[in-house]
Image: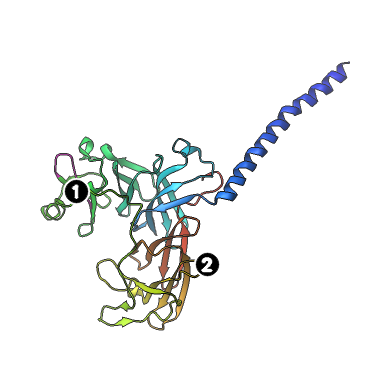
């Protein structure tokens, strides 16, 4: 009698284990089926890029609005999978260095990267200014936590800007003072007179509605590659298409990459079965094609790093932002905000 009872108990012990295993299998199956039918997590970058050399490697930082659905992401469960993130990439390898959540609100919070130094990254947002550690992505200070600003901060994205001449964040406080934070600084102080004159009438003046996520295409383009000697080079390496544009540097109007002997073109191909745009690197001396990547939209931001790499933004056919890095040796793309099935 005792032996029969023990056998019955052992059998009953396995029943809940089997039930739990079946339930977990069903949950995983449902999540997998939803992921398979809805595609990967989406990401929408803003139209700015910051680059700098950090701990011996050159990185680029972008801010993007993420939508992790249908991936399981407990960190964003309250915002139904939405968040605003800052992400850094190694420009040599294309690999992600860090990815930091800035806001976890439904629909995302308006924000974009202003600039960076070797120690800190500066992000402006609709809630105020954030300062991140450039090596780890950790948020060092935000909004009222910033020394020299405190409770006088303004919760408006256009109350903050990047002054390229002095390489500093410039901002307006609630008392009408124009302050600045130098690159790799953590404290705000009264801005120099020339900076005040340059920015006082610009800060916190935006009246139109809109979002930094709804950015325009990069407009500094030309059908030929302008060179510093006044000559232009025809982009003979570019694929045939409806429209072929050479991407230009911001400010100089010269071909981005010219210092290292290359240029980058974007070719519009609306009838292509693969992609709407081809981004291609060409050798300015020989006209040879060096490399190609594909995207679904024209470049929305273009910057040249200190080492001469041309960094730009586009997206792919699954609604994910792309960080594209071009050099004299080739071109590659990295998916912004890429997530695994569990949302990591």
Tell me where residue 153 sits by quadrant.
top left
Q: Residue at x 82, y 22 (%)?
A: 8
Q: Position of residue 216 (x, y in %)?
A: 33, 59
Residue 190 magenta-drawn?
Answer: no
Q: Position of residue 18 (x, y in %)?
A: 73, 32
- Where disc 2 sits, the SS reads loop
The crowding category of the residue bearing disc 1, from other C-alpha atoms within 10 Å (few below 14, some 14 to 19, many at least 20), is few
Q: Which mark is residue 76?
A: none
On the rendered structure, is 231 left or right of 267? left
* Residue sitting at the far right: 1
The x and y percentages for residue 148 are 20, 40
Task: Reply yes or no: does residue 169 show up in magenta.
Answer: yes
Residue at the extreme top: 1
Q: Nearer the viewer, residue 142 or 134?
A: 142
Element on which disc 1 rests: loop
- The residue most toward the front is 271
How many numbered badges does the structure rendering display?
A: 2
Q: Would you name the residue on which mark 2 appears?
A: 274
Q: Which mark is residue 205?
A: 1
**Coloration of the structure image:** rainbow
Magenta-colored span: 168-177
Q: Please, is residue 211 above or below residue 315 in the view?
A: above
Residue 327: percent from left, percent from top: 41, 70
Q: Is residue 120 visible?
A: no
- Residue 141 appearing in the image: yes
Q: Quadrant of the N terminus?
A: top right
Q: Residues within 10 Å of mark 2 (few under 14, many from 20)?
A: few
Kindly indicate whether the residue at mark 2 contacts the one at mark 1 (C-beta within 8 angstroms). Answer: no
């Amino acid at each position: 009698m005792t032996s029969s009872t023990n056998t019955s108990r052992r059998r009953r012990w396995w029943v809940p284990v089997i039930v739990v295993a079946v339930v977990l299998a069903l949950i995983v199956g449902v999540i997998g089926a939803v992921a398979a039918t809805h595609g990967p997590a989406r990401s929408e970058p803003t139209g700015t890029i910051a680059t700098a050399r950090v701990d011996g490697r050159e990185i680029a930082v972008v801010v993007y609005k993420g939508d992790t659905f249908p991936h399981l992401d407990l960190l964003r469960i309250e915002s139904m999978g939405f968040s605003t993130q800052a992400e850094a990439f190694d420009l040599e390898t294309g690999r992600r260095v860090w990815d930091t959540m800035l806001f976890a609100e439904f629909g995302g919070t308006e924000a974009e990267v202003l600039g960076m130094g070797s120690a800190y990254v500066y992000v402006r947002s609709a809630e105020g200014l954030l300062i991140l550690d450039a090596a780890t992505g950790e948020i060092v200070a935000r909004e009222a936590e910033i020394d020299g600003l405190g409770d006088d901060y303004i919760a408006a994205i256009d109350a903050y800007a990047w002054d390229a001449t002095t390489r500093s964040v410039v901002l307006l406080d609630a008392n009408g003072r124009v302050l600045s934070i130098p690159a790799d600084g953590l404290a705000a102080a009264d801005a120099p007179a020339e900076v005040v004159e340059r920015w006082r009438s610009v800060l916190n003046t935006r009246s139109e509605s809109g979002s930094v996520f709804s950015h325009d295409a990069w407009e500094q383009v030309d059908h030929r590659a302008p060179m510093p000697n006044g000559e232009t080079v025809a982009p003979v390496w570019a694929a045939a298409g409806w429209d072929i544009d050479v991407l230009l540097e911001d400010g100089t109007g010269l071909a981005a990459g010219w210092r290292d002997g290359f240029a980058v073109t974007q070719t519009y191909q609306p009838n292509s079965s693969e992609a709407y745009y081809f981004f291609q690197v060409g050798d300015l001396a020989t006209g040879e094609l060096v490399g190609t990547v594909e995207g679904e939209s024209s470049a929305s931001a273009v910057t040249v790093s200190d080492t001469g790499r041309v960094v730009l933004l586009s997206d792919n056919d699954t609604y994910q932002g792309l960080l594209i890095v071009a050099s004299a040796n080739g071109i590659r793309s990295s998916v912004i905000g890429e997530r695994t099935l569990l949302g990591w």
